Amino acid sequence: MSDSTEGPLADGPDPAGDEPVSPAPPAMTGRARPSSPLGRAWRGFRAWRRSRPFWAGVLLIIAGAELLLIPLPIHDMGVILHIGVGGVSGILIGAVLILIGLLLWFHPAQHIFYSIVAVLLALAALIASNLGGFLLGTLLGIIGGSLGFAWMPGRPERRTPGSGWSPTALRKLTLSVTRTRRPTLSPTPKRPPTLRSAQPPRPGRAPTPPQRIR
Amino acid sequence: MSSEINPSAGGRRHLFGHRRARASVPGRVRWRRFALMFLPAAAVTAILLVVTANGALAVSFSISGQQGETSADSLTGTGFQQFGTADVTKGGTIIPVAESEISSAQITNLCQSLVESLPLGLGDVTLTIRGGTGGTPVSASSLIIDANQLGGSTATFNNIQEGIDAGSVSDATGMAAGTEGNFAQQATSISISNLQEVAYATSAGTLTLPGFSLSLTAGDSPCFAGGPVNSFNL
């Protein structure tokens, strides 16, 4: 039972993985990985990243920082007192966009509301703050907000009904188990145990039982 | 009591497992949903830009800290005041600037450029905004320019008052006066042709930009090369 819950979880990120994972059975990779702490930390980060609209947050934070920094009178040039109306709104919009990026990371449950607010603010920045940070901040904000809006937890809609991710993983698991077991189980009634070691190389036997299962 | 604790403990463990499972459920970006949000937003952006380029929508500008160049064929404004002030850098260096405040201004062939050096040795990029090129001038309100170089071929000031106290300037209505005791000048209206200035901060409450264009070019190509000609002695 513990194997069946662990298997799909470890299997889950693999098909969508952007780093290639060896096609070994999921249980094997799950046991082999934690040896290096760095790899485990990376896998932990990857799981964290995938369970929230991560890239939407990244884009919104960049957009907010860009909008905020242009009018902000603190550069290497120093402090300039007059920032004007556009400066105040730019700083405000930028700060809120950064905040929304962080909220998308740490409170992804409300990601739709946050994302809509982010897109509206990015549009408002076009008028209120340096043409939206010379278009860059507005564009990044719209893309980030749309990504946050489009992100949904769980798998995408089931193309073929009834084949969710966990049942297929389970079926794969049982198939792999039966494939390894069948050749040893089927010959037992016929052959004496001493001859069993010579059985696996025979080609005719192995492919048939899985077909019968399907 | 104990019979209550045991199920609750079991329930808690189940809840924890549920939470852990939910937290690690990977999500996906549904690209159809992305389009549903992105396309209308991009369309609104395009509409706003077109309306801005037609001069029907005023945008607000505020740039500070970067040294930018502004040039224009002509600037006519009402309500002008100018006083000396200083921008202080973090290192303590004092940059003397002339802060010009104009209540409302009409600008033809406006060009504003910012040269930014990219990190990682990628060189310079120049961001250029142009406006008021097609007959209709750019109009700006509450224009504030912290310039350290300001020049023009001809400048006309009407009802100019020179040498007045910076704390008591009032021609640019509704805008901040300078520090008391500093030199200032003010005029009810000004007209400058072939304006060239180098500014550390530019701010405009509203700016309509008919015929506006925004371009990003590689390299250092500002609106005008070198210092401004015929610079006033500030």
Image: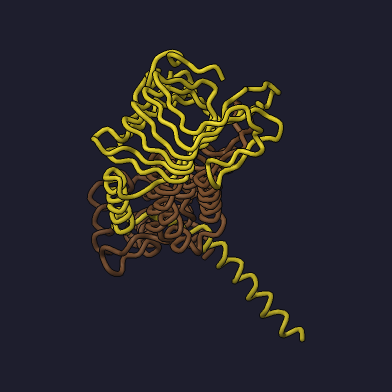
Residue ID at (47%, 41%): B204
Q: Left or right: B224 with respect to B148?
A: left
Name the residue at the right extreme.
B1
Chain displayed in brown: A
- Between B141 and A52, the residue placed more toward the observer is B141
- Between A90 and A51, the residue placed more toward the observer is A90
Residue ID at (55%, 33%): B186
User: Does residue A94 appear in this view?
Assistant: yes
Residue A12: image quadrant is bottom left
Residue B182, position as x, y percentages in the image: 68, 29
Residue ID at (46%, 53%): A53
Residue B165: image quadrant is top right
Q: Left or right: B15 with respect to A161?
A: right
- Between B207 and B29, the residue placed more toward the observer is B207
The type of colouring in the image is: by chain
Residue B60, position as x, y percentages in the image: 44, 45
Chain displayed in yellow: B
- Between B171 and B84, the residue placed more toward the observer is B171
Residue B72, position as x, y percentages in the image: 36, 27
Residue A203, position as x, y percentages in the image: 25, 46
